[in-house]
Image (tube, grey):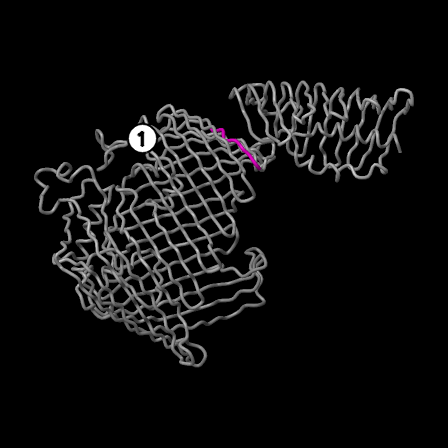
Amino acid sequence: MKHRVVFAGLVVAVLLMFAFTPSLLAQVEEILGDTSQMQIEADTVEHSQQTGEARARGNVRIIYGNLTMTADDVAVNQETEDFTATGNVVIDLKDGGQWRAPAVKGNFKTRAFSFGPYRLDGSVWHSGGDGGENSADGNQTLHNAWLSTCDCPEPHYRLSASSIGHRADNRFFAKNVVLRFGRVPVFYLPFLWGSTNANQFGYILKPGYSGKRGAYLQVGRVWKLGDDHSAKAYVDVMSKRGVGLGADYEQSNERRDVDLTAYGLHDTDTPETSDGFNRRFESKDDRYRVNYYHRERLSAKLSLRLNLDLLSDIEMLEDWFRRDYRRYEQPKSYLDVSYDERWYSVGIALRPRLNEFYTVSETLPEIRLDIPRVRLGVLPLMYQSETKAGYHSMKWRNFALGRDQLLPLGVFDPAQHGDLDDYRSMRADTVHFIYLPFELRDRVTVTPRAGARATYYNQSSKTRVTGNDIANNLAVDNPDNVFAINAIRNYDDDGGEITRFAFETGIEARTSMSSDWLDLALPALSIQDLRHVVEPYVNYTYASTPTEDRDFIYFFDEIDRLEKQNFLRLGLDQRLNTRRDGGVVSVLRWQSYADVHFDRGEESGRYGGDLGNRLDVMPRRDLRFWGVLLHDMGEGEIHRGELGTRLGEEERLNLSLRYIYRNDHLSRSAWSMGSSLVDLTGESSYIKKMFETSDIAAGDLNVPINALTSVNIHAEYDFEENRLSEHFYTLRRQLHCWVMSLGVGWDNSDFQAMIMFHLTAFPKVKLDLDF
């Protein structure tokens, strides 16, 4: 038993060699188990009462829990607590981890030890070096050490350092750090510091080249500050754009979401469309973005949402935050506090304009009271209302270049081609609806409705601004339409206060029918049983002409543009459902609607409205088709069309094709205050817009060459410009310990080249080089 205790101490001491694997140290007791279960094998085992030394010689093998240690010679002195293990010292764990060294020596009492050349192979990390030591205070040092996730005897890549110091709190400091591919050095850092806890830190290392940035290098640090929040800081060094500094912070849990982004640089190649200007704005060399989002559940019913997005210039988002730019070209800043009860919801909201190069309808502030559709006691009636009151201000973009500097002398007219004036008004709006739902023969749900809206403004205009005028104003306000010749029309502030009343009645009827094929099985299409669901509906809306002409009411949003509505919508929603993957999915969905107006529209002068269709077909997991078509029955033209298909699964051979068409037209409204209407393309609102023609075809092709290699091709062709606007080519290769992607491409003549390495062994700590 004495021998077991002595050698157990030795094994624990040597196990400290794994100190760079904290998850292992946290499980020492679980790995080792009870000393009474230790097995000791050796050619000879001796114990000297005189010297207090226990020694095992020849083929020493110690099995202790889930750990096996082998060596040629092991000695422990019980008096001095010194120990040595020599001759091919190896520790093996049942999970596959292994540590090897020619010898190790130290002292149990001080926990100081040293060892020579070693090799460590864990389940994820692999390391080696010339040797190291552990001091009495728990600090460790490795000499000429390297680290990699590659398990080859000679790793394909490694991070090496002349010395690595490691403290008991898992923090480390490394000198002369070199990233090597094979034996070739590709990157050097004089110092590197952090934590060996992979859940608490990470590094960013992105060298590369692009047409806009030139040769660049991004170096940064990531901190895992807890289970639900993290932070990172980084530096961008770019040959064409200068030096940028950035920092991010994220926190996410059930109660709170926080996201902070800050980035700034002195741009040495500021985008300009003319000398000193970018479109109609002054160009900025000092560029930045500060974005702060906060969601807080203050109580079970009270919540807060805040978003602040401050930008230096209109190009900042597109240049440096492309993903956000594609999601929303113009970010919103707002504060919203809501209290939600079962029968009502109250709140207060602010929406300021932080960036003068954006057009924003400010609300400073606005309070609201919403009552969802509820039954009125024992009556068969349902009631719903929404009330808002606030101070609104329309702030147009502050252009630096006037239109007199852009339009030719023969075209420019000071009376028509000036800039847009801001305006403001207090607005209080309330809308109330009563519904009387009933069933016809338990098959058809019929819902008559009637409602009224009252809106008060403390300011209005005596100058008429029509829907076409607003469309022209929006066209001139478009920063991409620099040389727009549209005439603008401004409101004045001479109209005084007004109160507008609007009324709406309508009736909606819908039903649902289905037929089943319960014995149908199509294994090739993953179809098991089939149900055809048909939901036809009809919705008639009549809204009388409001009591005040909308052309004299300040325009902030759709509420201000109410007009007479008298139309019938005929709709049909069809689905083919099947059972797949333990649930119900639609292998086909076809949504259709047609609007028939009972008054002539000013856009076409005809009664016909929009005929909208959307078809989604997914007969298999690897096959999908979709199409959207919006046809103006009054003008007899297609306003928008989209066709697309995806063939193949994501990781296999797959092809995606899509075609998008939109003609230039002025949209016509089909809008209801008291019911929801399907809008497949976002063109049915009260706000008239002049849509420009677009005619684009795009495709993506992914071709697996073998199990480890694939090629991806993306292309987009603009038929209006008669040019290939985008095309990218990427080669992806699964290597032994990483995935490598090589790519080149052009985005509107801007050349880009890319190489990325993603480590496969440890997804939380990865090396990502992006060219």
Residue 139 point in image, percent of width and height? 65, 25
Does the magenta stretch mainly form a helix, a strand or a loop? Answer: strand
The kind of residue tagged 1 is Asp
Residue 326 point in image, percent of width and height? 37, 43
Against 173, is 425 above or below?
below
Depth order, front residue of 209/427? 427
> Is residue 648 within the magenta segment?
no
Against 619, is 19 above or below?
above
Against 363, is 72 above or below?
above
Q: Which residues are magenta?
A: 200-206
Residue 308 point in image, percent of width and height? 36, 45
State which quarter of the image contains the C terminus. Answer: top left
> Is residue 205 within the magenta segment?
yes
For label 1, the crowd category at 10 Å Cα-Cα, with few meaning under 14, some 14 to 19 and many 20 or more, is few
State which quarter of the image contains the N terminus. Answer: top right
The residue at which mark 1 appears reads as: 286
Residue at position x 34%, y 47% in the image: 333
Residue at position x 38%, y 46% in the image: 327
